[in-house]
Amino acid sequence: MRYGLKEWTEGYVTITVRGKRFERFLNMAVREGLRIWNIRRVGEETCRCDILIADYFRLRPFLRETGCRSHVEQREGLPFWLVRLRRRSGLGIGAVLFFVGLYMLSSFVWTVEVTGTKQMSPQKVLQAAEQIGIKEGAWKVKLKEPLMLRKELMNLLPEASWIGVTIQGTKVTLNIVEKDDPVKPIVLGPRHLVAKKRAVIHTILPEAGRSQVKVNQFVEKGQVLVSGIIGSEERQQAVAARGTVMGEVWYTSDASVPLKQTHYRLTGERQEQQYLIVGAYAVQVWPWNKQGFARYESEESRFIPSYAGYTSPIGWKQVTQAEVVESQVELSTEEAIAYAKRFAREDILRKAGKDAVIREEKVLHATTENGKVYVSIHFSVIEDIAVEQPIVGVPQSPEPDSTP
């Protein structure tokens, strides 16, 4: 079967030829160069075939000579399509306007997105982009190459170290990488480092100042660990003491865990509900029979069109519900003690601060009463025990004697 662009452009018809000598008719037509294809027999003295319009009007001599008759069954191709379109001019004009409008709408920028900003205001980036033509409603044909747009934005935004410009469809994405401002040194006044709680010194690493304690030494709260007074008795100077002092601190934590616990888990069943948003109201449009789960977790996503700062009052909302089932679990005493230890560890480390490490833990006693396990746990924790203490009455270095 031949069905190419050339045949469709010139137009062709499907005809039925009846007669006792239709085979001779076909041979004569083909011998004279007529383009006939898709020939099939549909009866003892009938065949059907496809032929170009121009060649169809050359069939009369062959039909007369063989005594056959022809009948047009179907018309296909561009000429017949144009005739039908002329009869439905409104439909044709509408289709043309639709494709023209679709092309025009896809040729404009409808969304400008700014990503990567931390200190810089996204509004400032949008204002700079508008100066070089990147804005909602801009014609993409008039925009420069992304590399040129990037260079112009870099000139307008010196706070950025790099700017990426990506044009994808009707959306322009501006990816901003800001410059790292040099960290200004903080000027600290004279101070000591003192112990914030009772402890045994585990590690001491003074960076500035003079160490006043040693490893394995017991210290009380408020005791000076690193002194900010340096120098000899005759010539002293106050500095901001710095350093790290880790000490071993002791805690006792009491925790209780019920033996019967309620757990919740997702079953995997999900249900979506679609809503039409009109102003402050949401109307469910699907499914019509609202049958939610007895217990569920829900996620919501909204789509509200906006353009040039104007937000449409009509939008769409989708709510996804995930079914949750409740189950009762009964713990053994050992499992409850393990839970209590874990909760107590998290609580102790939260109190001790970052870089704290539990050195040792010991269950002092565990009892079961009224369906709960009560546990008392002793912890030995290595943590930073140093805090700052300003020096009052800063000693001054003696002025050099200028008397000759």
Image (cartoon, grey):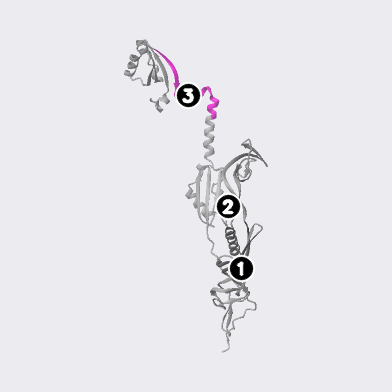
Seen from the viewer's position, the closer of residues 60 and 330 is 330
Question: Which label number is shown at residue 81?
Answer: 3
Q: Are marks 2 and 3 in contact (CB under 8 Å)?
A: no
Tell me the residue at 63%/64% (across/down). Answer: 254
Whether residue 109 appears in magenta in the rendering, the answer is no
- Going from the N terminus, do you reach mark 1 or mark 3 first? 3
Question: Which label number is shown at residue 218?
Answer: none
- The percent coordinates of residue 46 (x first, y second) are 39, 14
Q: Quadrant of the C terminus?
A: bottom right
Say which residue label 1 marks: 251
Looking at the rendering, which quadrant does residue 317 occupy?
top right
Seen from the viewer's position, the closer of residues 118 and 264 is 264
Q: Main secondary structure of the magenta part?
A: helix
Say which residue label 2 marks: 122
- Going from the N terminus, do you reach mark 2 or mark 3 first? 3
Looking at the rendering, which quadrant does residue 54 occupy?
top left
Left or right of 100, for residue 10? left
What is the span of residues highlighted in magenta in the rendered image?
A: 69-94
- The percent coordinates of residue 148 (x first, y second) are 48, 50
Real-space Cα separation, disc 2 to disc 3, in angstroms: 53 Å
Seen from the viewer's position, the closer of residues 304 and 174 is 304
Amino acid found under the numbered disc labelled 2: Pro
Real-space Cα separation, disc 1 to disc 3, in angstroms: 90 Å
- The percent coordinates of residue 257 (x first, y second) are 62, 58
Q: Residues within 10 Å of mark 3 (few under 14, many from 20)?
A: some
SS type, badge 1: strand
